[in-house]
Amino acid sequence: MSSSLSVGAVVIDASFAIAISARETDRETKATQEALRYSSLDYVFYAPGVLIAETLYVLCGKLQKGLLTQTEYAQAITRFEALMANILPSPNGDAPLVRRAEAIRDSYGCSRSADGIYIALAEALTVSVPTVILTFDTGMSSQAARNAPTVTVQTL
């Protein structure tokens, strides 16, 4: 995944990272194909810091529920670490996203708080380059359309 902002940006969310890291059979192929497609177009990949906490939490839950063995869990963590080596953090850090993320979340419940951060990051990047959020979260597109209409959400 390229490191120059010549063409566009992709913001990935936790559902995307989990699909690849845990090798979710119904999602991994779609996520990988889209990552390769955008990478071939020289898009740069970003994620806010919340992605790490959300992904680790879900992977741990999969281990505790028996959906991943200890070995599969260790492999998922390794794949997640490798994925994150190709993902840039928010260009100005996450602090400038706080107020905008909360405004985006305002009309939704607390469970949508993290979505506001991904959307706020994509909105900030959209000022400079075309930006898309890659997600499996079906509710994120309506949240973005309602509160950040310049943001493109691609639900996989």
Image (cartoon, rainbow, N blue to C red):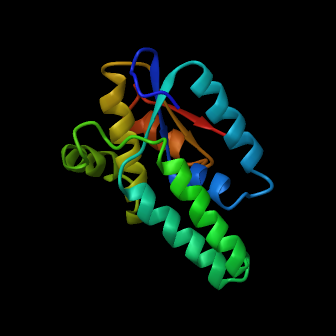
Q: Position of residue 9 (x, y in %)?
A: 45, 27
In the picture, measured across the screen, residue 27 lies left or right of residue 60, that is: right
The reply to whether residue 153 is in sight is: yes
In the image as oriented, which residue stretches furthest toward the right? Answer: 25
- At a point 19% along the width and 49% down the height, the residue shown is 95
Q: Position of residue 67 (x, y in %)?
A: 73, 76
Q: Is residue 143 above or below residue 43?
A: below
Quadrant assignment for the C terminus:
top right
Q: Is residue 14 above or below residue 141?
A: below
Number of numbered callouts drawn: 0
- At a point 66% along the width and 66% down the height, the residue shown is 75
In the image as oriented, which residue stretches furthest toward the top? Answer: 6
Q: Position of residue 24 (x, y in %)?
A: 74, 58
In the picture, measured across the screen, residue 36 lies left or right of residue 98, that is: right
In the picture, measured across the screen, residue 105 lies left or right of residue 56, that is: left
Q: Position of residue 51 (x, y in %)?
A: 44, 55
- At a point 72% along the width and 57% down the height, the residue shown is 23
In the picture, measured across the screen, residue 75 lies left or right of residue 130, that is: right
| The one of 2 and 35 positioned closer to us in this rendering | 2
- Image quadrant where residue 91 sits: top left
The reply to whether residue 112 is in sight is: no
